[in-house]
Amino acid sequence: MSSLEHPAVAKVAAALAEAGQPHAAQGIRILPADARTAAQAAEALGVAVGAIANSLIFRAVFEDGPRPLLSLTSGAHRADTALLAELIGAQAVEKADPRFVKEHTGQVIGGVAPVGHPAPILTLVDTALEQYDEIWAAAGHAKSVFPTTYAGLLELTGGRAADVAGAGT
């Protein structure tokens, strides 16, 4: 099975087309090797690391229990979990384990896409991504990526624009 035929990639392609972004679905690229980091993806694509949208799933802790949080973070810096918690009104935002990520996205760490999840996920989109004309995001598999724009990410995810890194990162 080629990576384009991978069920998670097919689900992402369908979600992109359904969201009115068929150009993104048609632009899915399969990289020659896994790109589990922004630096690896940027190198494979020949783009700035900041133009890579890391899809980071966190475990947001609220009074009524934990919920997933998707932070689409520029590959040029790290998300600040205390700031994320403040932005969404959570008691805490913690690193999610692989089981939690798979349960809420249907995808594995290293290939989590901004779309194609079993249910909508609360999403923050890093304002640092706005400076790039083209942004690359994972497409459901560690070797797959798709092109989009900052506005496209906001529209696709129903996410909220936010400075997710805060000062100093």
Image (cartoon, rainbow, N blue to C red):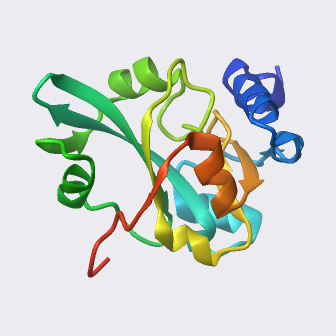
In the image, residue 60 sits, relative to residue 167, either above or below, namely above
Left or right of 51? Residue 54 is left
Q: Quadrant of residue 48?
A: bottom right
Residue 112, horizontal then vertical, whole percent: 54, 37
Going by the image, does 22 lie left or right of 7? right
- Identified at 65% across, 43% down, the residue is 156
Return the x and y of residue 86 as percentages of the image width and height: 19, 55
- Residue placed at 17% from the left, 57% from the top? 82
- Quadrant in the picture for residue 62: top left
Residue found at x 70% / y 47%: 33
Give the quadrant of the N terminus: top right
- Which residue is drawn at the image coordinates 81% and 43% (left, top)? 21
Q: Is residue 130 above or below residue 117?
A: below
Q: Specify whether 100 is left or right of 36.
A: left
Measured along the vertical axis of the image, is residue 3 above or below residue 160?
above
Q: Quadrant of the C terminus?
A: bottom left
Give the camera-side residue of 101 and 44.
Answer: 101
Q: Please state which of residues 96 and 115 is positioned toward the viewer in this rendering.
A: 115
Query: Which residue is outermost to the bottom?
Result: 168
How many numbered circles are shown? Answer: 0
Is residue 110 or residue 162 the one in the foreground?
A: 162
The percent position of residue 78, horizontal first and vertical second, equals 35, 64
